[in-house]
Amino acid sequence: MSGLGKGIVSSSITKIMLMHGLKALPMKFDGYLNYDCGTMNPFRHGEVFVLDDKGEVDMDFGNYERFINMDLDSSLSITGGKLFSEIISKERKGEFLGRDVQIIPHMTDFILNKVKSIAGDKKLDIMVIEVGGTVGDIENSYFIEAMRQLALKEKVAFVNVVYVPELKVVGEQKTKPTQLAIRELMGSGIQANFIVCRSERALDRSAKERIALFSNLDEKHIIDNTDLKSIYDVPASLIGQGFDKLILEELDIEGARIDNAELSKWNEYAKSISAKHKRTVKISIVGKYITLRDSYASVKEALTHSAGVEAVNLDLNWIESERLEGTSDNKIGEILGGSDGILVPGGFGSRGIEGMIKAIKFARENKIPYLGLCLGMQLMSIEFARNVCGIKDANSGEFNPSAKDKVIDLMESQKDIKSKGGTMRLGAWKARIRDGTYAYQAYKSRIISERHRHRYEFNNHYADRLEKKGLVISARTLDGNIVEMVEWKGQFGIGTQAHPELKSRLEKPAPLFLAFIEASIGKENRP
């Protein structure tokens, strides 16, 4: 089921194989008929993760990159929409020679050829394929069938991630849902080689025995994946159960040995996150998709990475921005007053915007460290224009197309675009940072590259007016046309048009997030 942790298991297996010196990469299949995730509502699907190559992909790619510390490309993301689009395109070109085109064999052959081609092009030893959805769903059934066929031609190990619930009134782990899941997969013609069991506590011996019996497996192939303090503890947990050696045996891979230095380094990073530290930093996240925390998964993880480096506990205060609208200044103070730092993440549409602006104003006037991401940067500019520069009608063309003073407006390159999917300013773009700014202090580099996803930008017609009043434009694109970062003069408040959270890794936290956490615990380094 959704949210069970298939992405974490896939990420962990890939990481473990890399630690063994093997070239491994993850691939993800999602059965929905959207071409990609770009047009999906965050409330329904969680955040849209953006890759360097402009690919808008499932949020599991964030886990993949954060675990394996690599930049991935969109060829590793396969959706039902992409597959059907390509199959129909081939049919229209006459590539099927007049035959009636069917799911089997044409779609399944197409999937097999795509998987093998990508694995070959990337010269992989192991490809870890995550099949999204639930076994038994119509939307992923043809992909599961393709994987069954793949096992007839290649060495494949099937890992079935299942849920083992426990009714508190009974106090017993129930394996019947797991048995039904295993039976459903067998009905698809697949015998799992491993059963990874998600549960709130470690599996009882009796539960493990029953699962092994119904899955035709030795008990050592029933893997415990109980709740841990941190997702980054999962690789060590799996290795501790000998899962890595069992996978290598199943795939007939000999001679691979784990790099203990790499494992120790990873475990040290993971320990810094899950350990109980002496000090706690409280960060208030004021957003519009708060009810589904997966909408801000990368933001949460980026903060976690930086808090781990600084050896502080992270206390996240999630605030729905609509809650702040129509609220008095005193009430705002009650809600945000205990914050060590305030962050406004990305988003689209006018709902909750005025609440975010109030939060930004509170941060600026009370000198609380602030970080604005994409929308958070745009609203930081609007707040400054309204409350410092006296431009009372300052707004964004996205929220009010008839506004007199559009401090934020539609990008020139977007004005003639009609289609929604894949048409924003996407992917990795370079920027040039000004010396003597908080941004430069964070990156310690003049030229940087971060990932983007937006249609609106800072209106350069207002640059001089805002700069004269103290807003610092600390970064622009290499051609100087687009404002990439703004900041408050003399206090830590940075807004970036990019999404630096997308490139933050456990082993290499995002520079802006690290600077934000440092400022929030009083370690601010003034430029």
Image: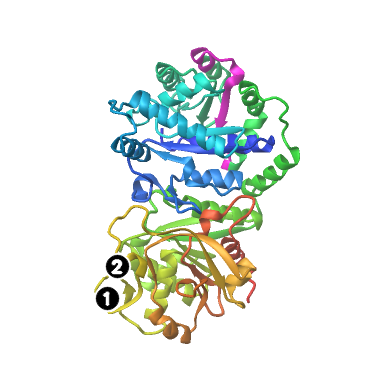
Q: Place residue 121 in its image quadrant.
A: top right
Residue displayed at 43% across by 19% down: 176
> Is 368 included in the stretch rendered in magenta?
no
Residue displayed at 37% across by 30% down: 140
Q: Mark 2 packing: few (<14 Cα in 10 Å), some, or many (20+)?
A: some
Q: Mark 1 packing: few (<14 Cα in 10 Å), some, or many (20+)?
A: some
SS label for mark 1: loop
Say which quadrant the C terminus sits in. bottom right
- Give the residue at the far left of this rendering: 402
> Is 229 included in the stretch rendered in magenta?
yes
Measured in 3D between alpha carbons, the distance from the residue under mark 1 to the one under mark 2, in whole angstroms, is: 9 Å
Q: Closest to the observer: 152 or 132?
A: 152
Residue displayed at 27% across by 26% down: 100
- Residue 283 drawn at (x, y percent): 52, 60
Q: Is residue 174 visible?
A: no
Q: How is colour applied across the structure in the image?
A: rainbow
Which residue lies under the disc numbered 2? Answer: 399
SS label for mark 2: loop
Q: How many marks?
A: 2
Which residue lies under the disc numbered 1? Answer: 403
Q: Which residues are magenta?
A: 211-231
Look at label 1 and name its amino acid: Ala
Is disc 1 in contact with disc 2, using a CB cutoff of under 8 Å?
Answer: yes
- Residue 124 drawn at (x, y percent): 60, 35
- Residue 194 drawn at (x, y percent): 55, 22
Q: Is residue 243 above or below residue 434?
A: above
Say which quadrant the N terminus sits in. top left
Q: Is residue 56 above or below residue 194?
A: below
Q: Is residue 201 above or below residue 249?
A: below
- Residue 31 drawn at (x, y percent): 37, 35
Q: Closest to the observer: 382 or 84?
A: 84
